[in-house]
Structure formats: C-alpha cells, structure tokens
Image: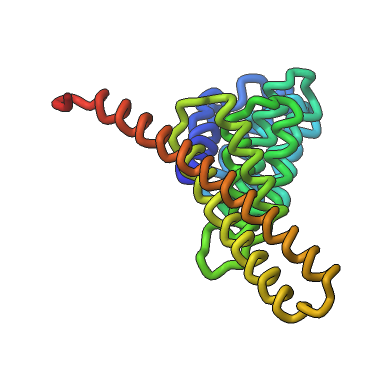
Amino acid sequence: MRALREAFLFSVLTLSGLLTGCSNPEDPALLHRALGNDYARNANWAAAAREYGLSLQANPREPKVWQLKANAHIKLGQVGEAAESLAKPAEYTSDPNAKAEAYRLVASLYVDQREFVEAEKAFAEALKFDPRDELALSWLGEIASARGGARLVSDPPDPTWLTRAIAYYDQAISVNPNNLFSYVNKRIAIHKYIVFEQQEQAMAERLIQLERRDPSKVAAARTHLMDSAARIAGFEKQIEELSNKIKELQGAEKAKKPGTS
C-alpha cells in the first residue's frame, strides 16, 4: 500500500511542467492552471481546486491537471471528488493503458483511505483495460482474502470470497510466476478455506449423530463429510506445492544477495 501511495504522490508532485507560470495569458486553460498552482503553493486548496476545475473546463484533456485537482481535493478531505478527478482522464483517451492507469490511481487513493470496497471497484475497472495488470490482480486478491476472513484468525471464513481470492492469486501468478507474495498470500487463503471445511465436517458429524434414525439424512451428511475431506486433501496438496515454490523463490532471492553461497 505504501508503494502504491508513493507512486501516486510521485505522479502528482513531479509535475514540473505544470508548476510553472502561465506562458500564454490568453489561453484560459493555462491561465487558470497557473492561478491554481499559485493557490496550491499557498495551501489554499479550495481556491486551487476551483481554478484547476476552470482550467479543465477549457481543456479537459490534461490528465496531469486532473491529478493536481485531485490532490487539492485530497488536502480538503474530499475523497469522492478526488477519485472522480483521477478517473476523468479515462473518458478522454482511447489508449487502454492510459485508461487502466487512471483507474489504478483511483484505486490507490481508496487503498490509502482504507476504503477497500471502492478500491476493489476501481481495480476491477483497471483490469477491463489491462487484464494482465499484476498490481490490480494482487490487490483484488488481498481485498477478497480479507473479506473472506483470511487476514484475521478471529474472522469467520467465507468460501465465496476465499474462492475469488485464490482465483485472483492464480491470475497474478500466471502474469508473474516469480512473485513470492502471490504464492504466500494464496497459501494463507487456502489455509482459511480449510478452516471452513473443518467446520463443515464438524457440522456433518454432528448431524449424523442427531439424525441417526433418519437414513436419508445420515447418508447425505456422510456424503458431505466425504466431499469435504476430499477438498481438504486437495487443499493440503496445494499447500505443499506452494510451500515448495516459496522455498525455491526464497532460495533464489537469497542467492542473489552479496556474500551468500
């Protein structure tokens, strides 16, 4: 999350070409942009946001000005307005990479604000234009994993979200087979899914005891118990494979460090 936030701030704070004065006073886009910069330098963020908005009314095809406007809204605590500004450049380009980048910036903002539901929506939009966006896939996996209960031992497991998380991690691994964290996080999600299956087994065993006089219910519970056991066995095999891959990648990373053999 920190790296994502720094990338966003870097894109905003290094706009050297936009932080200079107005070179053509007759161009309203340039005039209002320069006024916005003046207000921003004096931390008058409300006035800065207004001037950047006027600049964009004259020329809405300046993605960097949209980012400057978003930054002013962030300073004002206006997260929704900032997100709208960051998404706007996607409307004015046919370049799928530029569209994906706009939504990645929106997602980074929401991640920084810990508004993960909105971040999930923005990352999903980014994937529409860049289906192999490793960052978006990894974050979608993290969000789904958290909603599936995998990040806190005390949270109940949700198999629907855990299934989504595992699928996202698989996609991220297919994009970058050497990303250690995708394997680690997938293993965590699978461990939580096993907790769910163990709970299902306990319920089935209890049902067998309670309904022992009803052969049909007992048979259904036994079938459920066997199916759950098979799923756990499959998950345990995946965990073993993931653990081996994690050790392999950790060893390769260690070998790259100076002074190791």
Whether residue 71 sits left or right of residue 10 in the image: it is right
Residue 207: image location, x then y, percent: 73, 75
Regarding residue 71, the answer to whether it shows in the image is no
Q: Give the quadrant of residue 200.
A: bottom right
* Res 66 seen here: yes
Picture residue at 74% right of the left edge, 18% below the top? 95
Vertical comparison of 219 with 190: above or below: below
Say above or below: 80 vs 259: below
Residue closest to the eye, 22 or 196: 196
Pick the residue in front: 111 or 34.
111
Residue at 51% across, 37% down: 182
Judged left or right of residue 215, residue 206 is left
Percent coordinates x, y for residue 28 in the rendering:
75, 28
61 lies above or below 232 = above
Q: Position of residue 230 (x, y in %)?
A: 63, 49
Residue drawn at point x = 76 percent, y = 78 percent: 212
Residue that appears at 58% across and 30% down: 134
Residue 209, located in which quarter of the rendered image? Answer: bottom right
**In the picture, which quadrant includes the C terminus?**
top left
- Residue 67 on image: x %, y %: 63, 36
Q: How many marks?
A: 0
Dividing the picture into quadrants, the one containing residue 219 is bottom right
The image's colouring method is rainbow
Given residues 5 and 156, the one toward you in this image is 156
Residue most extreme to the left: 259
**In the displayed structure image, the side of residue 249 where residue 256 appears, left or right:** left
